[in-house]
Amino acid sequence: MRLGRWGTAREDRSDYRMRLARNHKYQLLLRMVQRLHQAGQAWPTGESLPARLAWGAHTATDRTTVLADVVSGYGGGVFSLETAVRMLQEAGYPVEDVAKEIERVQKRAFDQAARLADATGDNAAVREYLGLPEADPVPTVPLITSQPAPVPPGGISDTGRTGPGSRAASGKPQTSGG
């Protein structure tokens, strides 16, 4: 008899042993359900697919342990993001669609995107990883060929050369004012 909401370790071991003892029966039950659907023509006929029940965590300590395992395992590079999200889903966390959850996580994974940019140098791959649309192409600007700048008449050019009729060319001192 379970008292209260939180189970003890002894009760958790007992639940595990009961589930393990019934595992074969659950597989038979699922196969029977598939065959009933095939008989009622709800599913196409053929061989029954393998199926198993995935029991979620029923105590808060189980969920906390799974969350800690996911954080350390994924953060340490032991398993993939897909496995981490699937573990959370099986533990009873509200993950409805694994693929959509992974997409939402990756849209906020700026540190991993920065590492991807550093490793590949490919901005398109980073934008795809973050779920961003393709970037607009950078317009090309025509370059002017390098030719010497023309000397303005009667003045000194940027290069210090004097033009025809300039005061610097005639040797007359330049005065400011009128």
Image (tube, rainbow, N blue to C red):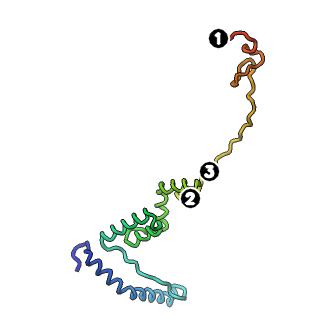
Q: Where is 164 relative to 14, above or below?
A: above
Res 71 → quadrant: bottom left
> Circle 2: is it few (<14), some (14-19), or many (20+) Cα within 10 Å?
some
Looking at numbered disc 2 in the image, what kind of residue is underneath it? Glu
Q: Quadrant of the C terminus?
A: top right
Q: Where is 169 relative to 104, above or below?
A: above
Q: Position of residue 177 (x, y in %)?
A: 64, 10
Considering depth in this image, is 118 or 166 the residue closer to the camera?
Answer: 118
How far separated are the C-alphas under marks 1 and 3?
52 Å
Looking at numbered disc 1 in the image, what kind of residue is underneath it? Ser
- Nearer-N-terminus badge (1/3): 3
Report the residue marked by disc 2. 128
Secondary structure of residue under mark 3: loop
Report the residue marked by disc 3. 136
Q: Are marks 3 and 2 in contact (CB under 8 Å)?
A: no
Q: Where is 122 relative to 87, above or below?
A: above
| Residue 70 in the figure: left or right of residue 151 | left
Q: Where is 49 relative to 84, above or below?
A: below
| Residue 66 in the figure: left or right of residue 50 | left
| Residue 104 in the figure: left or right of residue 166 | left
Q: Residue at x 37, y 71 (%)?
A: 92
